[in-house]
Amino acid sequence: MSTTNQDRVLAFIDLWNRRDLDGLLAAMAPDCVYHNIPWAPLVGHAAIREGLSLFVADAAEIDWQVRHIAQGADGLVLTERLDRFLLAGQWLEMPVMGIFQLREGLITHWRDYFDSAQFQAAMATLNQV
């Protein structure tokens, strides 16, 4: 049985839940582009490691829940997720739409769409604790 791009993305999400930063980077092409759409894109392992390390280091737990997933014939995998991070003893939850482009088994482009105002409001609530 062959591994599909959808399987690879689900495995990638499991790496998030295990807080495995090295595993996350290994699942990406060296020139991967990661773009949280409200912010500037990160290109390459070094920049992506720097950007993701804050999420991984600051979260006591991570729990990404896939609500829906779809795979296209062109290497695209679409995810509707609830991304949860346990920060300062509180769960921060963000609905996210993610798009993953894969080539030869590696993620080459990863775009996440979410409401940055909702994220900032949630972070402000955490900072008040």
Image (cartoon, rainbow, N blue to C red):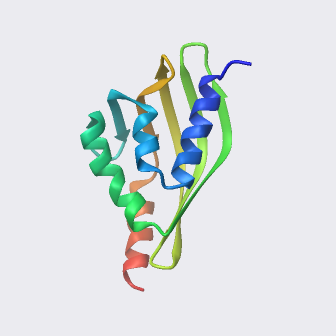
| Relative height, residue 19 to residue 5 (above, below) | below
Residue projecting furthest to the right: 1
Residue under the image location 30 percent in, 50 percent down = 51
Q: Could you tell me which quadrant the N terminus lies in? A: top right
**Image location (x, y in percent) of residue 109:** 40, 28
Question: Quarter-wise, where is residue 123 in the image?
Answer: bottom left
Residue projecting furthest to the bottom: 129
Residue projecting furthest to the top: 73
- Residue 121 visible in the displayed image: no
In the rendered structure, the answer to whether residue 46 lies left or right of residue 67 reads left
- Residue 120 visible in the displayed image: yes
Q: Could you tell me which quadrant the C terminus lies in? A: bottom left
**Image location (x, y in percent) of residue 8:** 58, 31
Residue under the image location 62 percent in, 38 percent down = 10
In the rendered structure, the answer to whether residue 57 lies left or right of residue 10 reads left
**Image location (x, y in percent) of residue 108:** 40, 25
**Image location (x, y in percent) of residue 56:** 42, 58
Total marks shown come to 0
Residue under the image location 47 percent in, 51 percent down = 20
